[in-house]
Each structure stands twice: as structure tokens, then as C-alpha cells.
Amino acid sequence: MAESRETLRQLIRRRLGRHPFVVVSNREPYSHEYRNGKVECIRPASGVTVAVDPVMQASRGLWIAHGSGSADQAVTDGGFVSAPPDRPTYRLKRVWLTKKQEEGYYYGFANSALWPLCHVAYRRPVFRDDHWRAYRTVNLLFAEKVAEEVRDQDAFLFIQDYHFALLPRLLRARCPNAIIAHFWHIPWPNPEVFRICPWKQEILDGLLGSDILGFHLRYHCMNFMDTVDRELEARPDREMTAVVYQGHTTKIRAFPISIDFEAISQRAASPEIRKLAQTLARKYRFPEKVILGVGADRLDYTKGIPERLDAIDAFLTRHPAYRDRFVFFQAGVPSRTQVEEYRRLSDEVEQKVAQINWKHGNARWQPLVLVQEHLSLNTLLALYRMARFALVSSLHDGMNLVAKEFVASQVDSNGVLLLSQFTGASRELRDALIINPYSADQVAEKIRQAIEMDPIEVRRRMGRMRRQVREQNVYRWAGSVIKKLSKLA
Ligand code: F6P
């Protein structure tokens, strides 16, 4: 039987009992924004928050995150707000950062140094002293904010991602009875790549303050162990997949993250989504009997969006018979727009879309629709349900939850998933059409294959992937982390 919110709740009650459960992440699960003079609550486009929110709803714990929404301060009471907004089950504590801190810590060290360092997407990391200082300051600030809540309680602390590499060590000193897990949601590169980081030892030292350090893939665990071996006076134990450092043992484990399959699947099957699909088809003027492809990403260079557009260009050039019926809808959520590399990407994507539409389109039909805004989950599900295929072409990706969401949305099993071989998800979803995003011509052929695939084969492949994602859902991911944590209590 697949794990569910209820089985996770029982597990948490059994295993964590009276121990407080605290999650720390940079991105908050819900943010409040001023829009057209009103306050709106939105769910940011983030794999981490999509995965951890259902876990928090089951655990009823405390989530501490950066309050980044324009209206966050206005709706927050004493630093806290209840979440989710429509059915509160847990508390969210918002931490405020100054613009300067956000610039150095988030846009700077986290996203201009660690992000390109850990993703093999051929972007050179930028290492600056002031960014590193801000990163340290913000890690310290979060350590204080967590410690205010936890003190010497026997709490379980679950830290998320590369924004907080130093936090485990800082918390070990402040919360002596806490059990600390850290989950690194992005790839961990091989030691050859990591060694260029000027603060490599500090980062490893920070992470090794955890009791458990999780990655999506065993491959990333091994890269981490190799890096420690190379850079620190520490003892990596390969049999136990653990590191002994300064007398403390950190277990290194792979926990492949996932989604709340049932919730997404049920929502995708609702009449509301069907109706919304019709509205969207009218709004975007999809041709009758459209052959729709969908891509949905943050506008990030690791997602391979220009490469995807090149592949569509190649497809339309090779297969002109599909003109007039084929539409590719690209949802691109603006992301990290203060970083130049991201601004350049946004311009590049816009230009490519314009060029391809000009080259192949005509007065009645344009092959590409680009929407650079935050789309609601309902809108995405409606698009997924209409889609003949989804195209995930990441150049490198820790897991990629869009791929799993697409699978969950396919309640009639009639869509095909094209999935980059460089995503963590491709290790699990073997029935996807696996692509190499670096070859536009190969991807173009896979698009043709997806469109022309026999419907029985489409259903067979999608049916298998659905069973897999239903089974390996986010509750199983959280359950495995919690089982490991509770063994240390
Ligand atoms: O995968 C790493 C991650 O932190 C995920 O939460 C998410 O996919 C993305 O990066 C979110 O980016 P940001 O919080 O910078 O918008």
C-alpha cells in the first residue's frame, strides 16, 4: 500500500511523539504579495516547498523560512502566520532579511556561486568575499531564529538545501539535544569540480554538523564522500556510507524526493480542470485538434529552455506536415532576476520564441506560446491534461518534480513524457522517452516519436510511471527521512 498523509501522520506520531519537528528553508511555502492593490497568497514555484508542504501538514510542526513576499510583513503576527491559508495545520515563522543580506546571501553566494558550482550547466561560478560574508551572516541569523524556538528541547530539525550549508554546525552548538538532518536538493558535483570553491572546507564542515545528510541520488552521496575524502581530515566510511569527523558521525543517505501523487491526480481529474482547459484553449487560440506540447519551469539556465526551443525549431523544419496543428506552450516563471545570467536567459528565450514563430508561423497559427508569469497549479494541470507530451530538458537537475507532476496529472494515461537523461527523475521514470537536451536533432525525433506513438503504448508507459510515482510519493520520502531520524533519538 502506498504511503499517504495519514500513514505519515501516524508514523510521525509513533516515531517523533512529543518531539518538536522544525523545518528550515530559504523559500517559504506560501508568500503574500500585493497585486492590484490587494493582498494575494501565492505558492512559489519551488520543488522544495511543493514537497515539504504536505509533510508539514501531516506533522503539524513549525516551518522557518525567509519572508520574501511584498505583503508578508503586513499579514504576519509576531513573526508567525498559519499555513496553509485555507486549512491551517502548521505555523510558519518568517525571518526578515535586509536587501543587502538578500543580495549577498541569496542572489550572491547561494545562486551565483553554489548553484552553478553544483550543476554541470557550464556557467562559471562567481566567488566573492562579500557574498560569502553575507551567506555566513544569514546562516547565523537563521541559527538564532531556530534556537529561539528549540533551545534544549529534543527536537528534530530538518534543514533544506544549499542556502544553509553552515546551519547544521551552528545549530549543533545552540540546540544540544536536537537531531539534525540536512537535505541537499541539488546535485553534488565530483571533487574535481567542488575543489575550486574558496570556502570548500567551511561548507563541508558546516554540513558535517548534521546527523543525517540526504541527497536525491546515491551518485551524489558518493560524490560527497569523495569530496570529503579529498578536502578534510575526516574518515569516510564507504560501507556504512557515513563520515566520521571530529568525533561525530554523519550518515550520508539517498532519499529520492517526490510529490503528493493522489492530491495532484484527484485535482487533475476534477470537472473544474476540464472546464479550465476549454477556457485556456480559447484564451491561447489553440487550433482545433491541437497537438499540444508543454514545458513548465522556472526561467533557469539549468532547465535547458533555449535547447528545447531549438529542438522544436528542428522538429518543425523536419516535419512540416505538423504545421498548423502543433503548439508548444512554455510556462517560464521569472526567477532570480537580480542575477545577470538569469536576465540574459529571459531575453534569449523571448528572442528565440519570436524568431521561431516568425520562421514557421503564419497569419492564423504560431507554434510557440510563451507565458512568463507565475501560473496556478490548476492552470498547469489543465495544460498537462490537454498535452500530448511534456518536455523536460534540464541540462542538470537534482530530481525535477515537474516530470512527476505531469505523470500524476495524466489520469487518462494519454500523454508522453520526454525527460532529460540528466535529471534525477530519469533514474526512476524509465518509461519516459529519455532525451539528451544537448542534441536538438535527437530531441526533435523524440518529439515526433511521442506524437506518433501508438496509443496503447502511450497508456502502457504512462500507466507504469503512474504506479511508480503513486508508490514512491512524497510521504514515502518523508517517511524514510523520519524513520532514519527517529532511530537516532
Ligand atoms: O532545487 C533547488 C531549489 O531550491 C528548489 O526549491 C526549487 O526547485 C528551486 O531551487 C527554487 O528556487 P528559488 O527558491 O531560488 O526560487
Image (cartoon, grey):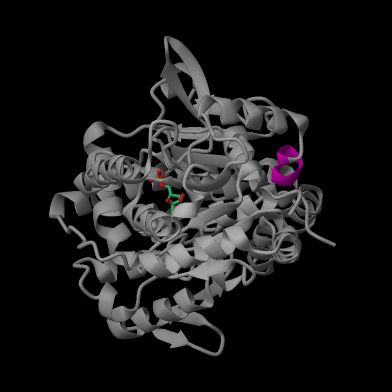
Secondary structure mostly seen in the magenta stretch:
helix
Residue at image position (24%, 39%) is 338
Q: Residue 267: image x %, image y %? A: 72, 38
Q: Look at the picture and state if 230 lies above or below 284.
A: below
**Residue at 44%, 24% in the rendered image:** 72
Residue at image x 60%, y 66%?
Answer: 432
Q: Quadrant of the N terminus?
A: bottom right
Would you say residue 209 sits in the magenta stretch? no
Residue 213 seen by the camera: no
- Residue 119 versus residue 242 in the image, above or below: above
Task: Using the image, determine if residue 488 lies above or below residue 16.
Answer: below
Q: Quadrant of residue 16?
A: bottom right
Furthest residue toward right: 1
x and y percent of residue 101 in the render?
25, 39
User: Residue 283, position in %: x, y?
Assistant: 53, 25
Q: Which residues are magenta?
A: 264-268
Q: Is residue 348 left or right of residue 149?
A: left
Residue 193 visible? yes
- Residue 452's spot in the image, x, y percent? 61, 61
